[in-house]
Amino acid sequence: MVQKATTVIVVEDETLVRLDIAMSLETEGFIVFEASNADEAIDILNTHPEIRLMFTDIDMPGSGLKLAAAVRDRWPPVNIIVTSGHRQLNDELLPVKGRFFSKPYDHARVITAMREMLGCA
């Protein structure tokens, strides 16, 4: 089980998709912050240094890939998972060290990947 101190941010402009994954993560013991765009995510990251992982959609206002690159540069300890319903990428093609999941994604696989990235698996 993930320790309660493991904090993540979910960045997704589709409200129902964001709420769905956030609820799954909270059920698994993660502390979850939510943002609907890159600007909100940056604000949250600036005020919450305890965040250890970002789960972001690529196709949203502010570009999820640009956000991932900015997080890599400003907050290197933050692990990154990106997702998209419109593009297919593999982990090696990401602009950051991270993981990619295409939509619709399997919540259990995402959570397993998060635990592995955080060293909790």
Image (cartoon, rainbow, N blue to C red):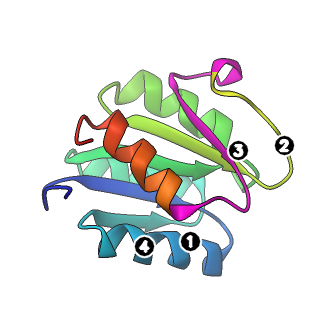
Q: Earlier in the sequence, mark 1 or mark 3?
A: 1
How far separated are the C-alphas under marks 2 and 1? Answer: 18 Å
Q: CA distance from mark 1 to mark 3?
A: 16 Å
As helix, strand or loop, the secondary structure at mark 3 comes to loop
Residue range of the region highlighted in magenta in the rendering: 92-107
Is there a contact, CB below 8 Å, between mark 2 and mark 1? no
Which residue does the image show at 36% across and 65% down from the upper left?
Answer: 33
Q: Residues within 10 Å of mark 1 (few under 14, many from 20)?
A: some
Q: Earlier in the sequence, mark 4 or mark 1?
A: 1
Q: Residues within 10 Å of mark 4 (few under 14, many from 20)?
A: some
Q: Please name the amino acid that badge 2 sits on.
A: Arg
Residue carrying label 3? 63
Residue type at numbered disc 4: Ser
The span from disc 4 to disc 2 (Cα, nearest Å) is 24 Å
The residue that mark 2 highlights is 87
Q: Is residue 28 left or right of residue 37?
A: left
Distance from disc 4 to disc 1, alpha carbons, whole Å, reads 10 Å
Kindly identify the amino acid type of the residue bearing the numbered disc 3. Answer: Ser
